Amino acid sequence: MPWTLPIRRARPFALLAPLALLAACSTQPPYERPALEVPEAFKEGVAGSSVWQAAQPMDSVPDAWWTLFNDPALDTLQQQAQDANQNIALSVARLRAARAAVGSSRAQLLPTLGANAGATRARSGTAADGSAVLATNASVGLSAGWELDLWGRLSGGVDAARASAQASADDLAALRLSVQATVAQTYFSLRTAEAQGRLLRETLDAYQRSWDLTRNRYRAGVASSADVAQAEAQYKSTQAQLIESETSRAQLEHALAALAGRAPAAFSLPPTAELPPPPPVPAQLPSRLLERRPDIAAAERRVAAANAQVGVARAAFFPSITLSASAGYRGSSIGNLLSAPNLVWSLGPALAASLFDGGARTAAVESARAAQDQAAATYRQTVITALQEVEDSLVAGAALEREQAVQAEAVAAAQRALEVVSNQYRAGTVAYLNVLSAQATVLSAQRSLIDVRNRRLAAVTTLLKNVAGRWSAVEQAPG
């Protein structure tokens, strides 16, 4: 009958309808962000202010928060580090690999198509007359295969790869933020070393004058040789401190060169000995700031990837079905290979299922669930650590601001005391040891003030890093 052959050829396609319905099933569990109890307000912030909203995957590099310090040299260093830092380059390459893995996973959802061609001539035995029996076989054809995504095994792999790629993008943003903060803190430490060096040079000039005065008084018979020795000892001790400060400055410059992806010999930063003023910290930080933390977003994406892998492991309990088809020509002569009698084709589904594996699939599901629990615990700990870091930065910034004011008052008081003691020594009413003590107190107070300024800059830098960028843009945003 003329309609028999077409119906027989169509039978394999009749399987597609129920298989398409099966493909809508999925063994992947619904994803839920790990629950975490967080306080309603920062302990060190304004009471009643909300502090937490869920982090979202980063779509861009954090803003240029370091420009809040209004330091052109720092701006240049940050740009150099973003362009040439090798740790950032490594993270960029990892992100490219993660995105390529997404493409590879997606490709498994699509059919494959291949082509083949070949020709062989072989001896298959000996004829009755003793001659060799030779045979020629030639073939050319196409083949196609498509594994149906039953139970969501393949799509689950795509979801896992996509979430991992998003986590890699957030890792890159976190690394950029870390490098930016390290550059800023190293730069401030370098300027601090320069400021310490300038202070020590000025102090050495004062100590030289004091030493000269003591030697003159000794020649006049109104000072002892011990006073001269003490003045010399103080001068030489301060010289040693200056050498240490210059060494520290050189090492910090080398560190900046490495952060900028350059050899120390090819890098130089002109000294200024000036520390920029820290930007003011708002009394109340917006609740949306922690949304931008790339490390939190990366941790959450890894939970999503682990959740998808649970579905992939579950799908192994169900059979896989592959549709395959092939068509081509096969014959004993290349000359008339492409002719109707040599046409061959095949079409049909294939089902594969594991009946016994000794508990391997059960163990794989349990391992995937354990990995998901690990990722969830890491996410929660990342959030808790972020809250701790912001709290620490808030209390440190506020305390150091007060400490700087008090330390400035201490410097002023020490200088007044030195003036009084110096006048008394010239009048001969106090020993030179009192002058030495007053001078040491002034130098210590001045060095402490410079150190407090550096620590305050570091605290503000750390706070900006902990909230993933400047807070002014978020403050101005509605909502």
Image (cartoon, grey):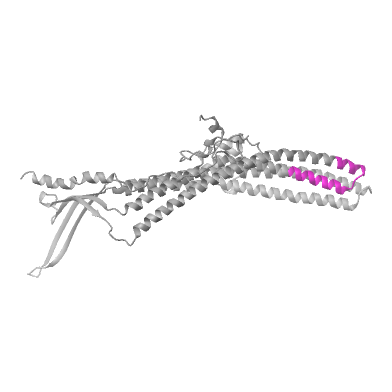
* Front one among 443 and 154: 154
Q: Residue at x 77, y 40 (%)?
A: 411
Say if residue 51 shows up in the picture.
Answer: yes
The tally of labels here is: 0
Task: Residue 204 in the image: state x and y as whole percent.
Answer: 78, 45
Span colored in magenta? 420-447
**Which secondary structure class fits the magenta region best?**
helix
Task: Residue 421 in the image: state x and y as whole percent.
Answer: 86, 42
Q: Residue at x 10, y 51 (%)?
A: 341
Q: Quadrant of residue 183?
A: top right
* Front one among 13 and 285: 285
Say if residue 100 shows up in the picture.
Answer: no
Q: In the displayed structure, would residue 79 be above or below residue 345?
A: above
Query: Given the current orientation, which residue lies at the most extreme right position?
Result: 221
* Front one among 432 and 46: 46
Q: Residue at x 58, y 46 (%)?
A: 257
Residue 146 lies within the magenta run: no
Task: Residue 381 in the image: state x and y as whole percent.
Answer: 52, 48
The N terminus: image quadrant: top left
Q: In the displayed structure, would residue 205 be above or below residue 126?
A: above
